[in-house]
Image: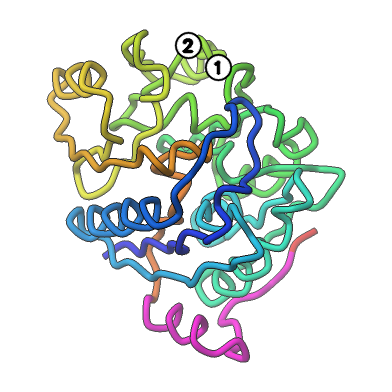
Amino acid sequence: MPIALTRQISPAIAACELTYMDRAPIDPARAAREHASYEDALRALGAEVVSLPADPGLPDCAFIEDTALVIDNVAVIASMRRPSRAPEIELAARLLATQREIARIRPPAYLEGGDAFLVGRTVFVGVSSRTNEAGVEALRSIAEPLGHRVVAVPVTGCLHLTTGASFLSEGRVLANPAWIDVEPIRRAGAEVVAVHPEEPWAANTLRLGGATLMAGGFPRTREIVEGLGIRTKVTPIDEIQKAEAGLTCMSLIFEGDADALRAATADPATPARRSTARA
């Protein structure tokens, strides 16, 4: 059973970082209810959810995807571009060290987990306002020895690569071609399925348990996806989306030992099972 590592909504979420969206009022209580429904959806799709408490001093802490990228037996710890988010990294690193060998990306290389996703043995990495070319090269130095190909994808119209593209099904990527350059994805051999043009935010989906989890409010893109024979499940995240966030942002999903993860969550002194560091 896969683990879905999540973190609760911060009561300070209204002070989150924004890049491409105008700031709008966010109701933390409503966002927390949406987050709880999201966790229920992950459970319904077969994941064992391990939920971490929120930090009132970290408005973006629920967006745990950005802290790391799990590739095979290695957890790649991100290098955050925004100083306000840098403190999120260490908790994720400590917990993931109970599950995987740790590899760190360090400034001036920057890479956030929301800028990367896997399709088979290919890692697509966004070159964005949060991830630079040096970050892509640092990830390449970690992933290629593990037998993965790293493909850079220019991101021009949204925050992270996963805002504008995500793994849909075997060999398929759902994408918004207005926000990212889809040609590197096509050249890498994946089929690009475009979102409906009137639903630009629909590209962020989460594949789990033989189904694709989609945010509410995108019925035309859902029809496109289901037309490919893909089973979908919908969960509403309207309030959370005001924080420039999507479905994948709120979890790290990997195979692992949930009991060890919970023990490490409960006891900060829990030793790491595998904690070899790489520069």
At 68% from the left and 60% from the top, the residue drawn is: 103
Q: Name the quadrant of the N terminus.
A: bottom left
Q: Quadrant of residue 42?
A: bottom left
At 58% from the left and 46% from the top, the residue drawn is: 113
Q: Name the quadrant of the C terminus.
A: bottom right
At 21% from the left and 50% from the top, the residue drawn is: 209
Q: CA distance from mark 2 to mark 1?
A: 5 Å
In the image, the segment drawn in magenta is 258-277
- The percent position of residue 210, horizontal first and vertical second, equals 19, 44
- The residue that disc 1 covers is 180
Q: Indicate left or right for 104 with 24 as reference.
A: right
- The residue that disc 2 covers is 177
User: What color scheme is it?
Assistant: rainbow
Q: Indicate left or right for 120 with 275 as reference.
A: left
Task: Specify the amino acid type for callout 2.
Answer: Pro
Label 2 with label 1: CB-CB less than 8 Å? yes
Q: Quadrant of residue 154?
A: top right
Residue 267 is covered by the magenta coloring:
yes
Q: Quadrant of residue 3?
A: bottom left
Residue 11 is covered by the magenta coloring:
no
Judge the density around disc 1: few (<14), some (14-19), many (≥20) Cα neighbours within 10 Å.
many
Query: What kind of element bears circle 2?
Result: loop
- The percent position of residue 272, horizontal first and vertical second, equals 60, 82
Query: What kind of element bears circle 1?
Result: loop
- The percent position of residue 236, horizontal first and vertical second, equals 28, 41
Q: Indicate left or right for 19 with 63 as reference.
A: right
Q: Indicate left or right for 42 with 92 as reference.
A: left
Judge the density around disc 2: few (<14), some (14-19), many (≥20) Cα neighbours within 10 Å.
many
Task: Specify the amino acid type for callout 1.
Answer: Ile
At 62% from the left and 91% from the top, the residue drawn is: 269
- The percent position of residue 156, horizontal first and vertical second, equals 63, 17
State the residue in front, 78 or 11: 11
